[in-house]
Amino acid sequence: MSVDTQLIPFRPAERTRHRRRLERTSLDAFPRDPVFRWILRLLFAVPYLAVTWAAANNTASAGLSSPNQQLLQHIARIDWNRADVSWIGDIFPPLSTLLAAAIPGGQTGLAIAGSLIAGVFLQKMLEIMAQRRFPLGTSTILLVALAANPLFAYTVTENFPAFLGLAFFGLGIADIFRFVAWGNTQSGFRAGILLMLAVLSDLSGIVYVLTAACAAPFLRLGRHHHQGARGASVLVIVFPTVAAIGALMALNVLFIGNALGAVGQEILAGTAERFLTIGAVFQTPTGWYLLASVFSGWFIALIVRRPGSIIISTLVFVAIMGSYVVGLIPAGSAGNTFILMTLMAIALVPTSKSTVAVIMMDLVASLQIAIAWGSAFNRDIVLQWMGTLPHVLNVLGH
C-alpha cells in the first residue's frame, strides 16, 4: 500500500468523512496566503502607527504621564552591572522591562513596537474567529468592539507592558479552548507558555492566569473518556507560570529571607485601604461599566444556551476584583478589564447556528462598543490622552 493511500482512504465516502473531520477541527492560518496575512497585519497596525507618528510631532502629549513614561523612568534607575536576586526584583516583570530597555526611541519607540504587535495580535484574533466558524457579522462587530475604541488605542501606544501581557493572554486563552474542547495537546503546552509570558510581561498577568484557571474547568471537554482530564488540563495550563513564580519566590527566601521580595511588598501595600473602598467603585460609572461587561457575558451565555458560561464570567469578575484589592492592577492602567472580557468572548463564547441567536449575539456584541467608549470617557488618563488627538488630526491633515 502506498503512503498516499495510508494517509487518505481510497474509498470516496471515507475520503469525504476524513475531509469533514479535518475541517471541523481546522487550525489553518487566516488568511492562508502568508503574503496576504502580513498585509492584513500591517493594515491593522497602520491606524496606531499613524497616531504614534503624529503624536511624536506635537508638544501636546509631551506632558502626559503614561505607563510607558513611568517604565522608562524605572529603567533609567536600574543598575545594569548587577545580577543578584534584588536586581531580578528590580527588572520584574523582566520580559517587558528588557524589551523596553532594548527598543530605541523612548516612548515613541515603545508606541511603534506596541502598534506592530497590535497588527499581529488583531490578525490572530480574526484568525481565531475564522477557525471557530464565527459568522462574518459577529466577527466584524467583535473586532470593532475590541480594537476601534480609545481604551485599546491608549493601551497599545501608551502602556507597552499591559498590552504585551494582554496579547499573550489573548493567544493563550484561544489555545486553551483548542486544548480543552478540541483535544489538541500541542495547544495546551503552548497556552501554558503564553500565560507564563503574560506574567513575565506585566504584573496583571497573574490575573490572566487566574482567569484561565477559572475558565478551563467549565469548557466542554473534548476528552470525555479520560478520567481526571479537567484537572490535568488546568495543571498543564498553569504549571509554567507556577514554576516561574515559585522559582523567584524560592530565590527570595534563600537570599533575602522574604518570599515576596520588594516587588511583592510594593504590590500589597495599601491592600486594606483598597478593600474598604471597593464597594464605592460600584457607585460610580467605572463600576457600572465593569458590571455591564459582566452582564453582557451572562446574556450571551443564555442566548447560546450555555448557562455554565455564566460561572466563567462571574469567576473572572471575582478574580479581577481580588486582583484590584491586592494591587495587581496598577494605577495608570485603563482598558485592561474591558480588553480582557472581550478576549474571553472571542476565545470562549460558543458559536450558534440559529439565526435568531446570532442576531441577538450581534446586538450584545454591539453593546460592547458603547461600553468601551463610555468607559474611555470615564477615565481621566484616557481623556487627557484623547485631548492630544485633535493635534494628531491636524498633523495628519497636513
Image: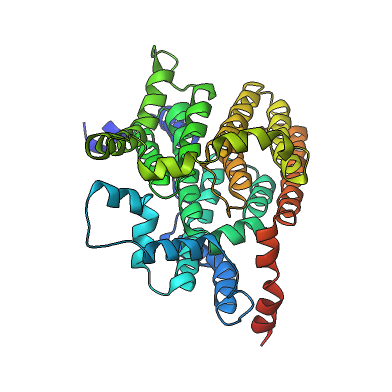
> Where does residue 362 sit, x and y in percent of width and height?
73, 42
Q: Position of residue 230 (x, y in %)?
A: 43, 19
Quadrant (top left, top right, bottom left, bottom right) of the N terminus: top left
Does residue 369 sit above or below 193 in this rendering? below
Residue 199: image x %, image y %?
41, 43
Q: Is residue 363 left or right of residue 28?
A: right
Q: Residue at x 28, y 62 (%)?
A: 79
Q: Is residue 265 above or below residue 98?
A: above
Q: Is residue 38 above or below residue 172?
A: below
The one of 345 and 141 positioned closer to us in this rendering: 345
Residue reaching furthest to the bottom: 398
State the residue in front, 220 or 196: 196
x 61%, y 40%: residue: 341
Callout count? 0
Residue 309: give x, y in percent of width and height. 62, 26
Instruction: Using the rendered image of the protein, determine whether residue 31 is visible from the camera's viewpoint.
Output: no
Residue plotted at (70% across, 32% down): 300
